[in-house]
Image (cartoon, grey):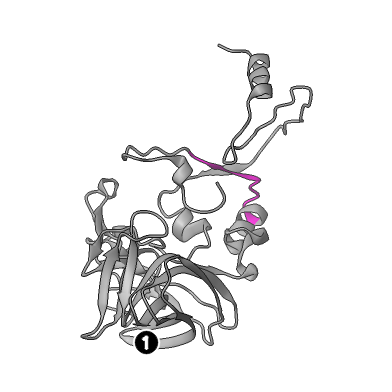
Amino acid sequence: MASLSTWLLLGSVWRPSAEDCVVTVDPTQRGVAQGRLVGAGIEDVNNELYGGLYTEMVYGDSFEEPPTDGVSGADFVQPIPAFSGRGLTRPTWKVWAASESSRFNVSFDRFHGNQSQLIQNGAIANFGLGQQGMYFAAGKDYRGFVYAKADGSATLSVSLVAEHNGRRQLLNSTTFQLKSSNTWLRLDFLLTPAASSFCAMAMPNSSFVPRAKLCGYSTPIPEVQSGCYQCTGGISLDVRGAPVRIDSISLQPGSWGRFRGLPVRKDVAEAMFNIAGWELLRLGGSMCNAAGYSWKNFRGTRR
């Protein structure tokens, strides 16, 4: 096995490329290890990140799920054996508005990943993880972006909406004018809802009708007595005119809801550090046996 000095020597003659990261080790500098650290482990399972610590409110933000009726992730069912044979239904996007001239297709002309969502004269909506809904606070800003590519003159409206027992409410909206383009355009938006969405425990016999059957599960869950906690908020994308391809959308609370400017929920982080007294989080390792898997292809600019 090569010694540390050997690796340092190799490092002195190696020249990194533009995409490489250089780690410099100075064995003469020593830190002081704390005698006691209090923290917890965290993984991308059981909604600890999506739907938990991560501030991203859109689930299915890159339209990678299998399509139904041309819409990415509509009625997408993924059986998970760990849940005692229960099938976990994870619909991501659904048709929000349609007419005879509407067109919904999955396109392989994409900005990121393997595919994008094509929309013409119609709208799709996303209600977060498992379509359990998003909570919006009135008067608070929510920021995001979406990448779009139009085949001609078109409008793209991004809206915060609420839906309760079939009744819909527009909370705020912004519209972009698009022209034919061969490149993907990043469209940034800031939306402040005029009213709050609300959340409640949805039971099978209650007046609050669950949007996703039994909180996304195809069979009853004894722990919550076949009910689930759901909210009314969501985000919709409405296209009029020429076909528009959509990819990589994000919606997050403004700085008021993020911990130290990071994409981390402020309320959750402050509870962990101030109430639980944690000093660190350890992200567990991951394994994926899918062909073509590479950590360098992870989503986002922080790699």
Counting from the top left corner in percent of width and height, residue 140 is at: 60, 78
Counting from the top left corner in percent of width and height, residue 267 is at: 60, 63
Residue 85, magenta (yes or no): no
Q: Which residues are magenta?
A: 275-284
The residue closer to the viewer here, 242 or 105, is 242
Q: Measured along the vertical axis of the image, is residue 122 above or below residue 29? A: below
Counting from the top left corner in percent of width and height, residue 122 is at: 31, 81
The residue closer to the viewer here, 19 or 104, is 19
**Residue at x 61% of width, y 64% of height:** 258
Q: Which residue is mark 1?
A: 168
Residue 225 visible, this orientation: no
As drawn, is 84 to the left or to the right of 63?
left
**Residue at x 48% of width, y 81% of height:** 176
Residue 121 visible, this orientation: yes
As drawn, is 85 to the left or to the right of 274?
left
Neighbor class of circle 1 (other Cα within 10 Å; few <14, some 14-19, many 20+) is few
In the figure, residue 246 lies in which quadrant? bottom left
As drawn, is 77 to the left or to the right of 188?
left
